[in-house]
Image (tube, rainbow, N blue to C red):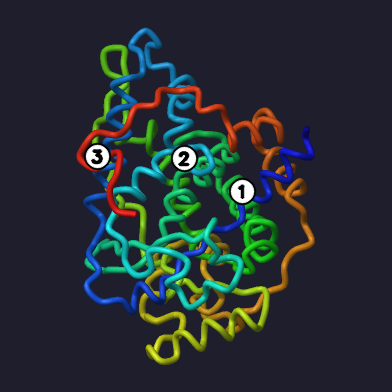
Amino acid sequence: MALFFLLTFSFLTGAAEPDNFSARHAPNSVIANSEINRVVNSVLSMATDQFQARNRCDREKFLQFLEDDLDRNFPKVDNYVYLNAPFAGPKSHEETPLNKFRGYGKVFFSPTVKLESKGKTFFVGLDKIDHFFSHGYLYWQMTGKKGTLDKEKVQNALQVGIEQENGPWGLKSSGVKSYADLAANYAGLSFWSQLLDGPSPMIACEKGRFVQKRSFDIANYFNEAMDETINCNSYATKEMLSAVYKMTAPWNMECPVKANACAELKKNYPAEIANKILHPRCLGTGDSQLEEASAKTTKDIIDMAGAAVSGGPQYLLFKMFGQNKKHQAQPQGENAGGGQR
């Protein structure tokens, strides 16, 4: 049974791959901030409303209550955003010039959305929503699930993310190492550390029950580091990298498409963080977009992460697959059960 779970886990966590270059090239894309914010805030609002008052602001029970919505691998919020957010660029793997490569196949293709933050627009795959919430939660678990983050534990969590991308989650499965995924994971860590903690938590205890005190705003967390045309990918094969070059050359695009964005990103992150989540091309420390896949297995990485998580590897597997034991309610608002595909 354990082997079955490990094999299934390896398959399910193969990296979803957006085509941000085609999205950036496509005309008339619209900014998706408001739609994503509405969905996430609906999920948070329903969670606080439906969490029973008799639990008396039990922190751990509330986090367990959020499992299926936010912190499971492929959480429900992924699907809600997918149904409501306007896409930019290809809507299926068949529309991207890279569709012949396994990472852009039907199962794991990820559409792209256009976002805006601090006056800048950029393009991110919807797979970053999963990385932000579920992988960000895993990082938060590894740092102790507190509002104040220990620097050494953060570095350890970031290293797990790198090993994921070097191995079964990236170069060994899809053939792509996404530094933008690593940036989304780190942003998710910030979200979870501020959800219930800090001077201005998003959700707080009042009169014996949790209430949402401020709204989620994706612009507070997402930035150009999650855009794979800026924070470049690395590839496992020359053939795949060549295909990217052939696709982008007629559009006069080369990653990073905005060098000044990389200069700003380096200033926005502490050096020890930037070195773990920004591509060498963005850091200015290297030029190659070819990297060799790690020899580490899925089990190696689960053990590595599980060692830092209370409950160990078996608990980690449960968190990833779960039982969907919670309510089946849909988020509030129109198009909650259907919409753009």
Q: Position of residue 220 (x, y in %)?
A: 31, 52
User: Closer to us: mark 1 or mark 2?
Assistant: 1
Q: Mark 3 points at which residue?
A: 215
- Looking at the rendered image, the quarter that the C terminus falls into is bottom left
The residue drawn where x is 35% and y is 13% is 52
The residue drawn where x is 46% and y is 27% is 63
Query: Residue lying furthest top in this view?
Result: 54
The image quarter in which residue 40 lies: top left
**Residue 280, numbered circle:** none
For the residues labelled 1 and 3, say whether their Cβ atoms are less than 8 Å apart. no
Q: Mark 1 points at which residue?
A: 12
Q: Residues within 10 Å of mark 2 (few under 14, many from 20)?
A: many
Q: Where is residue 168 in the image (x, y as percent from the top left)?
A: 69, 57
Q: Can residue 266 be seen in this view?
A: no
**Amino acid on which the number 2 mark rests in the picture:** Pro
**Amino acid on which the number 1 mark rests in the picture:** Leu
Left or right position of 12 against 246: right
Label 1 vs 3, first from the N-terminus: 1
Instruction: State how far apart marks 1 and 3 are (Cα).
Output: 31 Å
- Element under disc 1: helix
Q: Position of residue 269 (x, y in %)?
A: 44, 62
Residue 200 or residue 50, whichever sits in front = 50
Left or right position of 306 against 128: right
- Element under disc 2: loop
Instruction: State how far apart marks 1 and 2 are (Cα).
Output: 13 Å
**Residue 75, numbered circle:** 2
The image quarter in which residue 210 lies: top left
Residue 84 or residue 172, whichever sits in front = 84
